[in-house]
Amino acid sequence: MLIDSHDHLADPEFESDLDEVLARAQIRGVSRFICNASHEGRWAAVAAVARRHEGVIPAFGIHPWFAETAAQGWQDRLRERLKSTPSAIGECGLDRVREPRDEPFQEQVFRAHIIISRDTGRPLSIHGARAWGWLLSVLETEAPLPPFLLHSYGGGRA
């Protein structure tokens, strides 16, 4: 059994052929799909894909590219969604690929995800593109860490 541990199947580019995409993956042995939301505006779409397709597990969060969309009260809305939906948290994290960016706000949003994950026992899907040292320093100060999957790793072998 294979698990696609990080995808964005609820994104608009999959609307026309999602059934075929999932069927092809399942033929090749993929039976579970962790479908990540990039921002609060995609949470409902991710939940809908998970309801319609067996094996799709939703993950709700705010990707660092969309940190500026984190509207007042988003943490409470995320906690409420997690109460009603078996899911993970993500995609969240830190990113130094896109410009412009508000790094202090990215970090604030990421730390909030970690706290919610720790409080709820839900695993995190963490993005860390070109931000390895920064990401590592945040993770070190947030111990104990909840379970997580690290996506877009850019650190050294050690």
Image: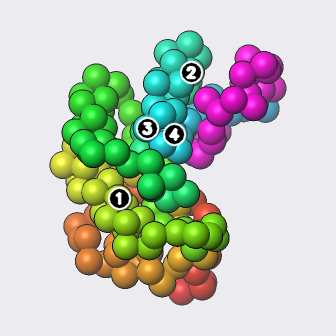
Q: Is residue 64 above or below residue 134?
A: above
Label 1 is placed on what type of residue?
Answer: Val
CB contact under 8 Å: marks 3 and 4? yes
Which circle marks residue 37 in the picture?
4
Task: Name the element at disc 3.
Answer: helix
Q: Quadrant of the N terminus?
A: top right
Whichever of callouts 1 and 3 sits on the residue coming sooner in the sequence is 3
CB contact under 8 Å: marks 2 and 3? no
Say which residue label 2 marks: 49
Dot 3 alpha-carbon crowd within 10 angstroms: few under 14, some 14 to 19, many 20 or more: many
Is residue 2 a member of the stretch shown in magenta?
A: yes
Q: Find the magenta span and give its range.
A: 1-26
- Residue 60 coordinates in the image, percent (x, y): 42, 39
Say which residue label 3 marks: 40
Task: Looking at this view, name the residue that lies furthest to the left.
Answer: 119
- Residue 136 coordinates in the image, percent (x, y): 42, 78
Q: Label 1, label 3: how many angstroms apart (C-alpha)?
A: 12 Å
Say which residue label 1 marks: 109
